């Protein structure tokens, strides 16, 4: 043990305790202390604010903030799963439940709080839960997935109660919320806002019971929770009950050792977070300052910083005003409350906007002189939350008439005002107390992406509600600094994909060489070459394997198949709309068998044959083409599939021929090259079995025609498509899609799906409507003509290749030998072949790579 | 015309007799592309960055994916130096040195190449 180092014990490894350890470490004086952290939970600190995300990820890893390894590296000892049971202040010594005894020079209590469970009968029955730790959520998840689980009840209709209700709903339970006060979120939202909130929540399928509370938890014969009996006599059957009726500070050990407590519980601290014992500090939810405790993470973080300053002799920092602004993170309903939400300041005025149709309620509170914004409540549309909170905190004079702040946004225009109006002192991220000035500095220092800003300022890393504002600020600052946000495609083209597309069309450029000579430099690379290949194909639709285009093609396009991890390829013929004849199925089966291919139904209603070697591809395709199949373009940034449901061809609910339309649409746009892949679907009625709303362009049948949805996306960041037009007849529908697709192709970035494109399109859906429906730019005819050219010049790429001996000659593994790639090896799995993993064919690989292999992996130190 | 690329000798000061093997005609490599050749049991990527007869030879083995695919990558340049990007995970390799431009700890073996009467020959170390 190093001499002279102070022994510092931190009790509790929650969000605030962790922040304290982190801050102490980065204060530069961490080595003056010998730090031991004692945590009751079996896990190191995790992101409790985002606890509900546990149900998305399914494991606690993604929430982790700390780890024993990280602590060890920082020289901090971490003892988990063993709560501190007592503190002996005389001896300056603690003892844990398991009997560990440790002496301290200074003690930091960061024990947080625990959910309050009202003392009613049956509250301990199996099936009753709280919502605070990962273990709680694991238990809830397990209970919800049991066969008998059907109905869940949440006791408490506050912010956390609604979050828990959402979780139960997502777990597939019929969900009820019980709130003792006459309205939901009584602490944050007023009566009027609450009424609108309630309607929105009911619309999501969550039943709301207000003005009543649970009197008893009913149990079944096995003693398990079976329902809730209300104080007003009513009953609700429920197999799962979650208590979310407030929190109580964890002040038991403080109380037992005689520390002074606050009037409403919690460990009393002064403005430097010192308790009644000068060697003991309390921070986070367990601390009581100014007569109250604080159930948010931001005040806790501020307390952690204050104690670090006190311990390290840093600038004397004191607790300041805490921002208690909150925003509901989930449930698909915007609710936020900030600053002086109820207008308690003397002379304050309130201004309301109530839109019962749209379900929007906004109340703003302004100072007596109407010069400053004091607070507000937002229900149904909290898009301006970040800006308004920052406005309140900066105490700046309002930049505009207050009405302007809540006026319903005109289509596409952002609500509120620009971030420019905020002073440098405005807090952008309340959780981490980061102001605009700090963020601007980071931007000036080179952090030119939201991710980078999060990394260097911590803004946006907790509840995330400030992230949109962060993005706005970044854009505004870069614009002001004249840092043109760099849209260069790559080092070879000093312009964006959109620019190149225009240049190609304007100057009738037909080859990469001509384009790079006039508008770029160098030989190109794997970024610009495929992008230009795609542009040329979208514009002129020449065969992509034409000699001059060949070097531009990614391997998939070059071999008209999808490369797999071992260098073999997969083959996916087009099965328009998923409609396939028994004969075609037999053919596919026969061909797959003949070439020893692995087959699988894809996620998009077609059949994949995997494991084809380069030199097999033409033979396989010869047989497929003979059987009437065409290229499925699964390899291209092109139209993939138009998925369909059976529609009125078979289904008793179908109102239109969804298969017929899907076949038509798929055949119309097949082969169309675009900035990214395109997917579509057609459903025969509103039940939406084809999942059209998850597609780039989705079509749903109505009694009167077709509804068109645009900009949907699955994948990593799923997004629903937006309703664009209703009850279109087939011809109008096709014309609209023609225009949409060509406009997207003209203006999208490289590898930008329609969803992201639409999100970034200035003016959004309304603008898109102006362009492709109202023809505001006068380009509709052009767009249609361009599409007509593509549709008219379609050729199956495989048929094309099979007819051209020169193209066929390229389908071989070796230029000087007909041998197959000797490194390809398959192993059986579930009755089919699959490529051997490198570790399964180590010997083979070693032999083939030979002694040079070591060369290939030489260390950079050499 | 013939172009050989410089490679570091196997051991400094040690002159190695190279065994020149015929791989293919220059015209068999589409300008701006690569093809693979099988020589002495080795898979070698022959890359021809442009219309000229300049050809580079490097191992066809991609150490990142452990598949033999380098020849099927896209050919181009980074800051003027000719390179090829692996088609699997897109790391770029300097055609002259084999050095991975995205991870300097990795280098592909490179081979001497010469072009005689329109034929590409690769110098193999015996
Ligand atoms: C056959 C199929 C359409 C097709 O041709 O592709 C289909 C057919 C029917 N779907 Fe579906 N759904 C089919 C995939 C889907 C999908 C897509 C998927 O799962 O991949 C969805 C969207 C995903 C989802 O589950 O939400 C889907 C969402 C629905 C819904 C809406 C469910 C909802 O929660 O809102 C209904 C309506 C309902 O539940 O009453 C529905 C109802 C139906 C019913 C049961 C309507 C009815 O009562 O007759 C159809 C059954 C007809 C029959 O005689 O069997 N089908 N349905 C699909 C069968 C897939 C299968 O593997 O069996
Ligand atoms: C579902 C949910 C959503 C939330 N959403 C938000 C939000 O959007 N915004 C926001 O600001 N806040 C939110 N919060 C609140 C936020 O999580 C807390 O304010 C924050 O975690 C408080 O940090 P803390 O360190 O004080 O307490 P905690 O994070 O609770 O940590 C205290 C730790 O101390 C341990 N401990 C207790 N007693 C002992 C003992 N005797 N010995 C050893 N260890 C002990 C506990 O087990 C716990 O691990 C949310 C909370 C939940 C549950
Ligand atoms: S969308 Fe409608 S018509 Fe199509 S399968 Fe589903 S229920 Fe039937
Ligand atoms: S306000 Fe919560 S992360 Fe920024």
Image (cartoon, coloured by chain):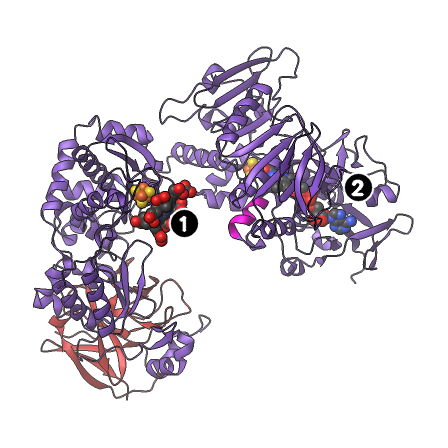
Count of labels shown? 2
* Neighbour tally class for label 1: few under 14, some 14-19, many 20 plus, Cα within 10 Å: few
**In the rendered image, which quarter is residue A566 located in?**
bottom left
Question: Mark 1 belongs to which subunit?
Answer: A
Q: Quadrant location of the C terminus of chain A?
A: bottom left
Range of residues picked out in magenta: A51-57
**In the rendered image, which quarter is residue A723 located in?**
top left
**Which chain wears red?**
B
The residue indicated by pointer 2 is A251
Q: Quadrant location of the N terminus of chain A?
A: bottom right
Residue A356 is situated, as x and y percent measured from the top left of the image, at 47, 19
The colour applied to the residues of chain A in this rendering is: purple
Q: Earlier in the sequence, mark 1 or mark 2?
A: 2
Q: Taking A325 as reference, is A84 left or right? A: right
> Which residue is found at the position 16% from the left and 34% from the top?
A731
Helix, strand or loop under label 2: loop
Residue with the most extreme front position: A221
| Distance between mark 1 and mark 2 Cα atoms | 43 Å
Decide whether residue A648 is among the magenta residues.
no
Helix, strand or loop under label 1: loop
């Amino acid at each position: 043990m190093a001499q002279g180092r102070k022994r510092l014990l931190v009790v509790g490894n929650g969000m605030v305790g962790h922040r304290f350890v982190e801050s102490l470490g980065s204060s530069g004086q961490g080595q003056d202390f010998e730090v031991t952290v004692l945590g009751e939970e079996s896990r190191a600190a995790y992101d409790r604010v985002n606890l509900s995300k546990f149900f998305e990820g399914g494991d606690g890893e993604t929430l982790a903030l700390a780890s024993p390894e990280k602590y060890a590296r920082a020289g901090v000892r971490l003892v988990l799963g063993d709560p501190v049971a007592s503190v002996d202040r005389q001896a300056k010594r603690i003892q844990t439940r398991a009997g560990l005894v440790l002496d301290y020079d200074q003690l930091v209590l960061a024990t947080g709080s625990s959910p309050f469970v009202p003392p009613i009968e049956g509250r301990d029955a199996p099936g009753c839960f709280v919502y605070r730790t990962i273990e709680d959520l694991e238990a809830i998840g397990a209970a919800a997935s049991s066969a008998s689980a059907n109905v869940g009840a949440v006791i408490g209709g506050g912010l956390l109660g609604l979050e828990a209700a959402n979780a139960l709903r997502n777990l597939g339970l019929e969900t009820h919320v019980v709130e003792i006060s006459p309205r939901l979120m009584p602490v944050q939202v007023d009566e009027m806002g609450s009424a609108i909130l309630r309607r929105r929540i009911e619309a999501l399928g969550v039943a709301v019971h207000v003005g009543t509370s649970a009197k008893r938890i009913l149990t079944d014969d096995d003693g398990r929770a079976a329902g809730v009996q209300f104080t007003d006599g009513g009953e609700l059957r429920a197999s799962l009950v979650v208590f979310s009726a407030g929190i109580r500070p964890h002040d038991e050990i403080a109380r037992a050792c005689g520390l002074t407590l606050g009037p409403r519980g919690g460990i009393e601290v002064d403005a430097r977070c010192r308790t009644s014992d000068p060697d003991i500090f309390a921070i986070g939810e367990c601390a009581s300052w100014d007569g109250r405790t604080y159930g948010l993470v931001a005040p806790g973080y501020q307390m952690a910083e204050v104690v670090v300053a006190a311990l390290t002799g840093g600038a004397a920092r004191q607790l300041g005003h805490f921002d208690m602004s909150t925003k509901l993170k989930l449930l698909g309903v915007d609710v936020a409350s900030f600053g002086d939400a109820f207008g308690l300041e003397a002379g304050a005025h309130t201004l309301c906007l109530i839109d019962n149709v749209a379900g929007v309620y906004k109340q703003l509170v302004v100072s007596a002189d109407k010069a400053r914004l004091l607070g507000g409540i937002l229900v149904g549309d909290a898009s301006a939350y970040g800006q308004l909170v920052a406005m309140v905190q900066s105490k700046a004079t309002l930049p505009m008439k207050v009405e302007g702040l809540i006026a319903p946004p005109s289509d596409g225009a952002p609500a509120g005002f620009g971030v420019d109006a905020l002073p440098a002192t405005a807090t952008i991220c309340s959780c981490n107390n980061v102001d605009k000035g700090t963020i601007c500095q980071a931007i000036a220092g080179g952090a030119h992406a939201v991710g980078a800003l999060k990394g260097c300022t911590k803004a946006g890393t907790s509840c995330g509600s400030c992230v949109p504002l962060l993005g706005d600020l970044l854009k505004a600052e870069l614009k002001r600094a004249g840092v043109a946000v760099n849209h260069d495609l790559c080092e070879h083209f000093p312009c964006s994909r959109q620019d190149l597309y225009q240049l190609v069309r304007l100057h009738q450029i037909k080859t990469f060489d001509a384009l790079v000579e006039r508008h770029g430099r160098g030989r190109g690379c794997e970024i610009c070459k495929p992008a230009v290949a795609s542009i040329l194909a979208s514009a002129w639709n020449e065969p992509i394997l034409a000699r001059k285009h060949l070097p531009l093609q990614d391997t998939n396009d070059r071999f008209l198949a999808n490369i797999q991890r071992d260098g073999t390829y997969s083959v996916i013929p087009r099965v328009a709309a998923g409609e396939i004849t028994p004969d075609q199925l037999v053919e596919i089966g026969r061909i797959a068998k003949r070439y020893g291919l692995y087959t699988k139904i894809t996620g998009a209603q077609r059949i994949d044959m995997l494991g084809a070697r380069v030199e097999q591809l033409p033979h396989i395709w010869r047989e497929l083409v003979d059987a009437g199949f065409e290229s499925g373009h699964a390899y291209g940034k092109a139209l993939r599939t138009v998925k369909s449901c059976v529609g009125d061809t078979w289904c008793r609910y179908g109102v239109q021929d969804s298969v017929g339309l899907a076949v038509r649409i798929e055949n119309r746009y097949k082969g169309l090259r675009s900035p990214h892949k395109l997917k579509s679907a057609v459903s025969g009625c509103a039940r939406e079995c084809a999942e059209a709303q998850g597609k780039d362009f989705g079509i749903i049948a109505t009694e009167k025609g077709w509804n068109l949805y645009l900009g949907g996306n699955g994948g990593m960041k799923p997004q629903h498509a937006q309703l664009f037009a209703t009850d279109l007849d087939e011809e109008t529908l096709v014309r609209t899609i023609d225009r949409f697709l060509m406009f997207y192709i003209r203006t999208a970035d490289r590898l930008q799906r329609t969803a992201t494109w639409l999100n970034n399109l200035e003016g959004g859906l309304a603008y898109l409507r102006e362009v492709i429906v109202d023809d505001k730019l006068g380009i509709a005819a052009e767009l249609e003509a361009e599409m007509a050219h593509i549709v008219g010049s379609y050729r199956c790429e495989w048929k094309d290749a099979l007819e051209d001996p020169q193209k066929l000659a390229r389908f071989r593994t070796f230029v000087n030998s007909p041998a197959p790639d000797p490194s390809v090896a398959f192993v059986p799995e579930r009755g089919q072949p699959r490529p051997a993993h490198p570790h399964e064919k180590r010997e083979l690989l070693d032999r083939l790579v030979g002694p040079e292999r070591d060369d290939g992996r030489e260390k950079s130190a050499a | 015309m013939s172009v050989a690329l410089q490679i570091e000798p196997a051991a400094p000061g040690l002159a190695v007799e190279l065994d020149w093997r015929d791989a293919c005609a220059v015209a068999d490599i589409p300008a701006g592309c690569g093809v693979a050749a099988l020589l002495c049991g080795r898979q070698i990527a022959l890359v021809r960055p442009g219309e000229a007869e300049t050809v580079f030879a490097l191992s066809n083995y991609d150490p990142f994916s452990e598949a033999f695919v380098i020849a099927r990558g896209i050919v181009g340049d980074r800051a003027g130096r000719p390179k090829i990007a692996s088609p699997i995970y897109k790391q770029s390799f300097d055609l002259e040195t084999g050095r991975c431009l995205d991870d300097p700890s990795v280098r592909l073996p490179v081979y001497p190449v010469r072009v005689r009467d329109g034929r590409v020959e690769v110098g193999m170390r015996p």
